[in-house]
Amino acid sequence: MSDLITLTIDGKSIQAKEGEYILNVARANDVFIPAVCYLTRCSPTLACRLCLVEIDGKQAYSCNTKVKEGINVLTQTENIAKERRAIMEVYDVNHPLQCGVCDQSGECELQNYSLYMKVDSQNYTIKDVDRPAAVWGVMKYDPGLCIVCEKCVTVCKDMIGSNALSTVKRDSDGIDKVFKDTMPKDAYSMWNKLNKSLIGFEEDNCTDCGECISVCPVGALVSADFQYKSNAWELNKIPAANPHSSDCAFMYYETKHESIENSDEKIYRVTNEHHYSTLNGAARFAYDFENKVGGKDEEAFNKAVEAFKKAEVIKFNSYITNEEAYILQKIASKTGAKLVNKDAFYYKKFLENYSSTSGKSLYSSTLKDVHDSNFVISVGSYLKSDLPNARYAFNNSVIMNKGAGVYFHPIADPVMEKIGKKGKTTEFVYHKPLCEESILYLILDKFGKDLPQDVQTYLDSLKETRTKTVTETIKETVVNIVKDEETGEEKEVKKVVPKKVSTEVEYEFTKLLENIGQDETLLDTIDVLLAKKDKFSLMVGEDLYTHPKAENLAKLCGLIDRFTDFDIVIIPSQTNTLGVSLLCDLEEDASGFSVGYNEKADFQISALGDGDLDMPALNQQEGTFTNIDKKVIPTNVAIGYKGYVLNDIANAVLDTDVEYTIEYTIELPEEKGFSAIHFDKLSNHFGNNRVEYRGYDILPIEIVEEKKLQEGINSSFIVEELDEATSKTLELNEDEMIIYRANPINQFNEFTAIAHEFASDLESGFFASKSLFEKLGLEKGDKVNVSSNGTSLELNAFCDEQIDGEIGYVSTFQKDLATKSLFEQYRYSKAVIKKA
């Protein structure tokens, strides 16, 4: 950890970590310094220059000047005030006076700073030029409103990693020279840049996360769907958590009545605290998936109660709160029903096997730790779609921490390749499926220290000495005899010339490299990437815990955690997968009369409006999730619900009288790591010091005493030959190809699929890269027959230009399509694809 230093800002003595920027330190200590272009978690852009301060008598920009011991900082001087005032005047030059209808009005930084700096006159002018608006996917860009602060460019590069936005040149008249001679220097420089620039967009790189909309300080970037729907000050901000993925990122549902005639609340948009929390596109745009219910259907409710009482199986997924999972466990404990949730079951088993070798009940890392690390490896997760916030963390590590990373996955991903400099700061290894075991062994072999004897012996058995020819260029001194033309004397002239020399060298080779289709150059590349790296993170995903050898992979992860410098994140595949795995006793499958909660069953209760009894959606509930960072996070009701809830059924089945579901929050079992805290006592905000005050951390449980763990590692870990029979399960016949179970960007589940901004975009189907689409002879609008796992389905075919390679994927975000049946447990399957 960096040493603390002491500095003074406006007479206030402040302690800070060495290396922090003055602007961040000031904000953390409630000292206000204006800045339009700066984002707390991103690199400085120096676009607005409003953050000018005086440091020991010299002016500097606080956004990119780091603190030093003993410095004295003044945030206000006469000259600084003049510069800031002039800058704000420049921003107001030709800025359209449409505040009355602008979406940003009321929360516009241009408005705020113009008022703060008392801009009541204009000293600068220039002829304007036509700057037509454009629609970019989910957003609309109005260059007439744009102040080119570059926040959108910065967040797309530093936080998201898509690099879809950039500054581009525009036509304009030159600024009159008189202004250069008379106006403050920084204001003129900023104006000169502003006058020549606009924001450019590359559609192929964009993942429609909308973070650029969030950071835009004016109305230049807005949601095309929200534009002109409401004034900001009319909306109620309800703090909540992302209901679609396990980051459970902090966000606000912004609501108001539907109309003068209809007083029912409606969600108009979702926003976030962009300085502290990043949203994926599903959280921001797939917000209106509520279940519209006019009232309570008593007859249907009574049938539901009877169904639960006689149910032999309760099927559900992990898009539920902790409290609901706890209720289902209580019902199952009383009735003897089996709880079936395959997602959480596989995750729970993986975590248990991981614990047997790591000695920890929970994985060791968080996304914040990944963000703060400087060397990241990702294995077994299609990060772009599985969990965009994990991709963001990978990008943050590489870009913000000047780190490096290695991404292992069978599907080639041009979007991921936007992270860092391919081959220089990031390496992308696209391997065959079922090679994940070899990858983990390779990590263990490369980074392991004091490994258990059986493990080390096995790794050594995979190595052999090989010989290769190495050609290098050396410098050779050549001596020539030269005769002087005038004197006739001979003399020696030495000249250094390059010479190629080939030599045979021996090196140690591990067969693990061949298993994943690589040679020794991969290890050489990793060695280069490792230079000056000291904080390591490994992210593993659903491909591992659905793998045929998931038990061994989990134990390998535990060993990596224990015997290397890597901290590990095991990415939950659904919003509350971790919470459900901790709270519920689960079965992989079971037979008998079944009740389904948002799942197909003999009797269904559903928030999708397709069941025997309606239930509220997650934006109509308050409760908690257990997120990927192992925190219990609160979420609140955005809009009301007039029907029954799961707690009503529980009261009838359990013969209890619990008024509100959140009364169970304090009952969540402490022996599973939860804390006895009432829902209304849970904090839910970020501080100016960038600390997350949300909920509480799950407490890890001691699994095994240290001595017993040490003795048991060898016996509990499966040391065996890499299973060639397993890898042959995906050997292909001539007419077969591999398909992957995954969803396109921002489509996570049945709920995102019915949100109005996504509902018309796509239907579930078969997705292929452009090259594979052409190879299969497909065109837009075609359908294909997909035959796999004893099932044949006719599906829509889509070209996904944000992937490469020969592996197509099949989506599962629509409940009424049986696409999951094309796969067994593992996410990969052999399939025959034919044009319908």
Image: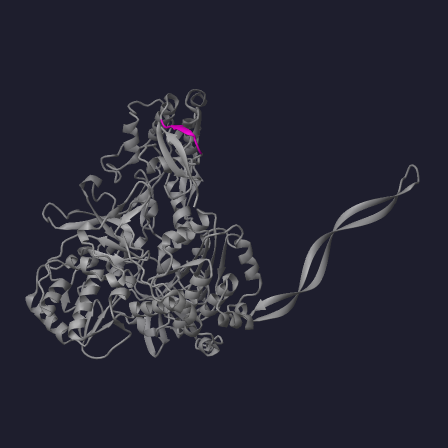
Asked if the magenta segment contains residue 73, the reply would be yes
Seen from this angle, which residue lies furthest left?
298
Residue 750 seen in this snapshot: no
Front one among 353 and 574: 353
Relative to 244, is 346 above or below? Answer: below
Q: Position of residue 716 (x, y in %)?
A: 41, 73
Q: Is residue 590 left or right of residue 70?
A: left
Q: How many marks?
A: 0
Q: Position of residue 156 (x, y in %)?
A: 39, 47
Q: Position of residue 528 (x, y in %)?
A: 55, 54
Relative to 138, is 583 above or below? Answer: below
Relative to 555, is 135 above or below? Answer: above
Q: Position of residue 704 (x, y in %)?
A: 35, 67
The magenta span reads 69-75
Q: Quadrant of the C terminus?
A: bottom left
Picture quadrant where residue 827 is located: bottom left
Relative to 192, is 565 above or below? Answer: below
Picture quadrant where residue 742 is located: bottom left
Residue 472 seen in this snapshot: yes
Asked if the magenta segment contains residue 350, the reply would be no
Front one among 558 and 659: 558
